[in-house]
Image: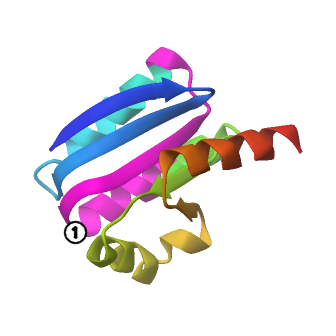
Amino acid sequence: MEIIYEISQDALIAELFGEMDHHSAEKIRTDIDGMIEEYGSKNLIFDFGRVTFMDSSGIGIVLGRYKKRQAEGGKVVIVDCEPRIRNILNMAGIFSLMKYMDTKEEALDYLQRKEVS
């Protein structure tokens, strides 16, 4: 699993590449948490466009980051899932907790609107 990070507005964007499974879960978790702490990002955008596989460990990563961002007044948005990955997240109830957007730009616009209101 590789992650490319981008900071935009008050959001950390984590673009994920590869498999989110029990083999990569701890590294993903510590890397994302470290970047949030380092840059003080309030919000998190998961870009799943290049995720090829995800198991329950991946769902745990998303839920854990959601709980941390929510506790600090932030939001988590998921963008650009292939249908199979999106279906896994949907069946796990993820989209009842956080928004899904097609693009990072839509997610950033959504987060900006939520900050203003």
Residue 68 lies in what quarter of the image?
A: top right
At numbered mark 1, what does the secondary structure look like: helix, strand or loop? Answer: loop
Residue type, numbered disc 1: Asp
In depth, the one of 96 and 80 nearer the eye is 80
Q: Mark 1 points at which residue?
A: 55
Q: How many labels does the image show?
A: 1
Q: Which residue is drawn at 17% across and 59% down?
A: 21
Q: Tell me if residue 4 comes above or below residue 25 in the rendering.
A: above
Q: Residue at x 33, y 42 (%)?
A: 15
Residue 34: x and y in percent read 38, 25
In the picture, measured across the screen, residue 97 lies left or right of residue 73, that is left
In the picture, measured across the screen, residue 82 lies left or right of residue 42, that is left
Where does the C terminus fall, quadrant-wise? Answer: top right
In depth, the one of 46 and 67 nearer the eye is 46
In depth, the one of 51 and 70 nearer the eye is 51
**Magenta region includes residue 99:** no
Check the image and name the residue furthest to the top. Answer: 38
Q: Which residue is drawn at 30% across and 71% down?
A: 85
Q: Tell me if residue 54 comes above or below residue 1 in the rendering.
A: below
Q: Which residue is drawn at 73% across and 39% down?
A: 112
Q: Tell me if residue 93 comes above or below residue 111 in the rendering.
A: below
Residue 71: x and y in percent read 65, 43
Residue 101: x and y in percent read 54, 60
Q: How crowded is mark 1: few (under 14 residues within 10 Å), some or many (20 or more)?
A: some
**Magenta region includes residue 57:** yes
Per the rendered image, the range of residues in magenta is: 38-65
Q: Tell me if residue 112 comes above or below residue 88 in the rendering.
A: above
Check the image and name the residue furthest to the right. Answer: 117
In the picture, measured across the screen, residue 107 lies left or right of residue 50, that is right
Check the image and name the residue furthest to the bottom. Answer: 91
In the picture, measured across the screen, residue 15 lies left or right of residue 12, that is left
